[in-house]
Image: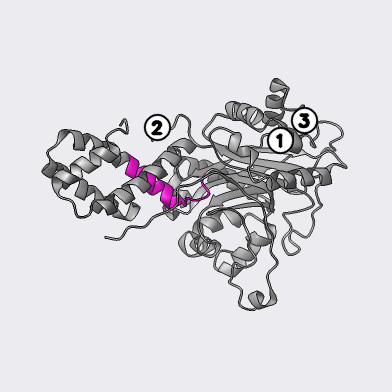
Amino acid sequence: MEYRSFPTPGRTAVVRVQQAPSREAGASAPPTAGLRPDTAGRAGMITVLTALRPLGASWLRVLFALTRRLPGLTGLGPLESVHFIRWSVLGSLPHDGPPQVRERLPHRLLLWETVYSAPTQPYVETFVYGVGDKVRNIWWTSHGFPGSRSVTGLAGYIGDLSIPGAHWWSAHPGATVRTILSALDVVREHRYLVRAARTTTPAEFAVVYRGFLARRQGDL
Amino acid sequence: MNATWPATPLTVLTPVVPGQEQALRESLRRLSETGVSPFSRVAETHFARWVVVSGAPWRYRGRPRRTRPLRMQYLLFTSTANRPHEQHVEDLRTGLRGDADAAWGHCVGYPGYQESAGFRRYLLHNRLPIHRWFAAYDATVREVGDALDLRRRHTEFAVRTQDVDDLGLQEAFLAEFGDDGT
């Protein structure tokens, strides 16, 4: 049996450090080199605004309404690398009076923000190889979308459009999504284990506990 | 997990007062340099972020061909918290205090954190709709922290008790976890 350990998350502020890639690094750059998310420990954060094609907003409203009722259509559940994702279709911006000038958007916009935990390249690869059709269903509505068949193309698109954060924070900088989901699963079984430890014989408890280990060894 | 409220996203977009764009960026940079984010004082917040939006950030390699940039710069705030919006906004006010003013104080119409009703009205007025939302979990920040801690303890316990007999296992388990209150 192999046990892995992960650090317990602390609470840290994140100071953004930008590093320009060296020429040497550029020569053998991975396909996602152009995509530099803001990172807080193991979490990456990306914010993107895209311009929607005509009818794109209508399509997205229908699609989002549908996936609210049938979340499986979103296709994100099995990825286990996404903490949170939000999509907003914007036709106008809030107005607060002078000195704000009234903004008339030239296009409807799609605001997309993701908080995920994974190295960036595998994360983008899952969008290409894992849920490429779901990604296309959403993003074809945006001008310039290169399709979801190429990791380099998709990473370049997201990287070019991503808006860098000015300040950000994560309450779980040391934990991945998988770690968190595993820990929550352990909690569910833990209650039962404690009850069993108090009410069963040592032999019975050993059976229960070893069953727990067999089921949860991947989560520990 | 019995989350009191599901993980809920909040997105707020506020216009930056013309001429104060650089001061805003400086303020946000200083917040990052303190080493402890003011968001650490905001209850039940998983993630939070300020982003300055300007120009035509949606333009990609000349597409769309005909577009025009934003006329102003905007401060985009996003967060995820196990709170209804109204409660989360109040948490932001009482948690961020002066740091809220350091950021939103450069925005048009911001009343300051000391004006409770005005602060709430301002952020809720500038909320953006969220049409689709995905959350991997609904557990609160505390539940996540406690779960990660429990998982670590179980891992250490499993390693420690690999060679003990049944009676020793049960006694060790109760010694380790018997007082957990579950």
Q: Quadrant of residue B182?
A: top left
Q: Is residue B76 above or below residue A195?
A: below
SS assignment at label 2: loop
Q: Quadrant of residue A38?
A: bottom right
Q: Looking at the picture, which amino acid does disc 1 mark?
A: Asp
The residue beneath circle 1 is B99
Q: Please indicate whether residue B133 sits to the left or right of residue B114 in the image.
A: left
Q: Provide residue A57's location: percent of width, then percent of height.
A: 64, 46
Relative depth, front residue between B28 and B175: B175
Q: Please indicate whether residue B56 sits to the left or right of residue A131 in the image.
A: right
Q: Please indicate whether residue A165 sits to the left or right of residue A82 in the image.
A: right
Rounded to the nearest angstrom, the CA distance separating label 3 from label 2 is 36 Å
Q: Quadrant of residue B8?
A: top right
User: Which disc is residue B2 wearing?
Assistant: 2
Q: Please indicate whether residue A186 sits to the left or right of residue B134 in the image.
A: left
Say if the magenta span includes residue A182: yes
The residue beneath circle 3 is B110
SS assignment at label 3: loop
Q: Provide residue A22's location: percent of width, then percent of height.
A: 69, 73
Q: Is residue B139 visible?
A: yes
Relative depth, front residue between A171 and A127: A171
Q: Is residue A62 above or below residue B42?
A: below
Q: Looking at the picture, which amino acid does disc 3 mark?
A: Tyr
Q: Looking at the picture, which amino acid does disc 2 mark?
A: Asn
Tell me where the magenta segment starts and ends, as one range: A172-187
